[in-house]
Amino acid sequence: MQRLYANSSEQRESITRRRLVGEGQHPDKMQGHWVLARAGKRVLRPGGLELTRRMLNALAIGPEDRIVEFAPGLGLTARMALRKHPLVYWGVEREPAAVEHLRRELAGTNANVVLGHAEESGLPSACVNVVYGEAMLSMQSQEQKSRIFAEAVRLLAAAGRYGIHELCLTPDNISDRLRHEIQAAMSKEIHVGVQPLTAAEWVRLFEQNGLNVTWRSEAPMHLLEPVRVLRDEGFRGGLRIAFHLATNPMLRQRVCAMRRLFRKYGDHLGAISLIGQREFRPVESRGLL
C-alpha cells in the first residue's frame, strides 16, 4: 500500500512538473532552469541546498517573523522556511501554473501565494521583516535588479532583513571582455539573459539601497557536478535524473551542454549569499494577518 502511494505521489509530481515547464515545448527551446526541472532536478540554486540552508539560518526566521519570498518556483525553499514557523509567509510568483502548484502544495499552512512580479509585488509597504529570493536577480538587467531591491526595501519594516542567493563572477577585478564573454555564452545556452555580478558589486547594490550587509557566504557553482547533484537530490533523486536523461536524448544534450559551459568558466563562476539589514527610521507597519 505504501509503495502504491509513493508511485501515485511521484506520478502527480511528474505531471505537475511537466505542466510547469510547458507541456509539449521542445527541450531545445526551453529556458535552462526548466530544462533541469524537466530532467527531475529539484534544487536549482547555484550554491546548492547547503548555501540555501546557511542563508535561512542566518536570516534567523522565528515565530514572530512575517516573510516574503520572491519567485518561490516549485516551493522547495518555501517548505524549508515554513519549518521555521514564521507568523506568516507570502510567496510572490509570476508563473500562473507555479502559483497554482504552490497553493496546492502549501495548503493547510500559514502560507499565501500571490501572482505578481518581484519588482511590483502589490503587497503593502513595511509589511514584513524578512524578504529573500534565490537564483533570480542574476537573470535581470541592472535596472531590473535595482527595481527588485527597491521593492524589497519598500516591503521591509525597520531593521528588516533581505537575503539573496545568486550567481557570482570572480574575481572582483574580472575583465570586461571575460565578463561579456561569460554573459553571452550563458545567455545563448540557457535561453535567458544572464547578468551576474562580482561579490563587490552585489555588496554595492545592497549599500546603494540602504541595506547594511551583515552576513555573507559563498560556494562553488557546481550545480551539475555529480557530487553536488547527489548531495542536493539524494541517491534516489540522482537515479531519477539519470533515467530522464538516458531516455530523452534532446534533454540530455541540453543538460550536458550546460555542464560543459559551467566547467569551461568554472574559475570565474561561483555562488554567493548575502543578507542586508534595513537601517532606515521606523515606519508604520501594516500586518497581513
Image (tube, rainbow, N blue to C red):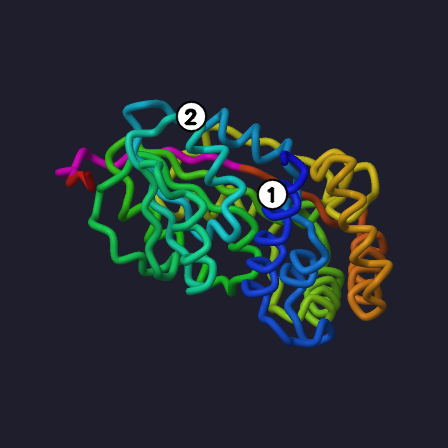
Q: Position of residue 5 (x, y in %)?
A: 60, 41
- Is 278 within the magenta? yes
Q: Position of residue 35 (x, y in %)?
A: 69, 63
Whether residue 162 sits left or right of residue 121 in the image: it is: right
Residue 272, picture quadrant: top right
Q: Nearer the viewer, residue 159 or 5?
A: 5
Depicted 169 relative to depicted 15: above or below:
above
Depicted 90 relative to depicted 62: above or below:
below
Residue assigned mark 2: 84
Taking the spot 64% from the left edge, 45% from the top edge, the residue there is 43
Label at residue 275: none
**Label 1: few (<14), some or many (≥20) within 10 Å?**
many
Q: Quadrant of the N terminus?
A: top right
Whether residue 142 sits left or right of residue 267 in the image: it is: left
Nearest to N terminus: mark 2 or mark 1? 2
Q: Nearer the viewer, residue 24 or 209?
A: 24
Q: Secondary structure at mark 2?
A: loop
- What is the CA distance from the residue labelled 2 to the residue labelled 1? 28 Å
Q: Nearer the viewer, residue 184 or 95?
A: 95
Depicted 252 relative to depicted 125: above or below:
below
Taking the spot 34% from the left edge, 41% from the top edge, the residue there is 111
Residue range in magenta is 274-285
Residue assigned mark 1: 199
Judged by depth in the image, the label closer to the viewer, 2 or 1, is 2
